[in-house]
Image: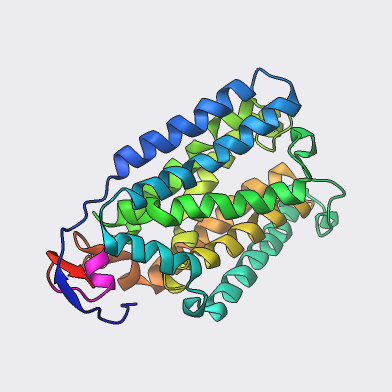
Amino acid sequence: MKANTTSVGEIRPYKYRPVLFFALAYLFTWLFWVPAIFVPQEFGGILMLVGLIAPAAVSTVFVLASGSDLLKKDLKIKLIGLYKVKWRNVLLAVVQFAGIVACSILLSLAFGQSLDQFAFTEDFSFTGVGIGSALITVTLASIIEEVGWKGYCEDSIGAYMNWFWESLIFGALWSFWHFPLLFIKGTYQAGLMVNPLYVVNFFISGIPLGFIITWVYLVSDRSILACMIYHLFVNFLQEKIAMTPETKCVETIVVTVVAAIIVITNRDMFFETRHVGKLLETRYGVEDSGARAE
């Protein structure tokens, strides 16, 4: 998925800094989330929201302070280049996850779960967090997170390796980023603390999901909007479909199988290394890493 070639002149190549990015994203998120554990829920909700913004804020600062016109152009296109979104692929991804949920519920019947799970729950699992309606919270989380993760983060890892290893590393780091939420009363993650298996399953599930969302990102021409839509749909189904915690453990297995199928059927996408060391230059057709887009 190579974009049209850009006219070029002299430029300074940009070097991504994934370690620094994650260090700052974790720092500024947890700086607000950890205190939220100890304060009343109405104040904790505000701290949670501020912490949620941190990866997007760090990502934006990294891009604006990069001194790279190509990196700034890339973020602008990923944010507002709606004409580049592959809507058929987005729809396919959404339908695919709905299938994952349905398959997980059906498989859970073998473990004594009920068909009653094919229903909507009355409430969200974190209505007590005190930051407005849960639906708005889910929507904001999907939008804000993806600005950070797709605005800079995933590319910063992918610039140094193929997308298979990038997906594995990103999925693990993204999953563990949620860790303080386990101890904040009223969050979905805190509700998992009744059983260590549910907690372990939550963190493991983020890894295969990382492969799927990377696929959504790449097949949609690296569109942030496409990832926002997919993330929102996943969050909504996870919250509103009446799956039991046991079924969500089954769901992790199903997600892993689907992720494996996606990788196998898109081997070139996940294992090519043509972009390594020259991600932006490859995307915009810049032959020389010392060129500057006009």
Q: Which residues are magenta?
A: 280-287
Is any atom of residue 261 visible in this view?
Answer: no
Viewer-nearest residue: 287 or 239: 287
Look at 68% across and 60% down and name the residue there. 101
Residue 208 x/y as whole percent: 48, 53
Residue 42 x/y as whole percent: 75, 28
Report whether 2 appears left or right of 184: left
Q: Is residue 5 above or below residue 15?
A: below
Look at 26% across and 65% down and name the residue there. 280
Viewer-nearest residue: 43 or 229: 43
Residue 25 x/y as whole percent: 43, 38
Q: Is residue 239 above or below residue 195?
A: below
Quarter of the image that includes the N terminus: bottom left
Viewer-nearest residue: 257 or 143: 143
Look at 49% across and 61% down and name the residue there. 212
Let me know if residue 151 is in the magenta part: no
Q: Is residue 204 above or below residue 264?
A: above
Is any atom of residue 93 visible in this view?
Answer: yes
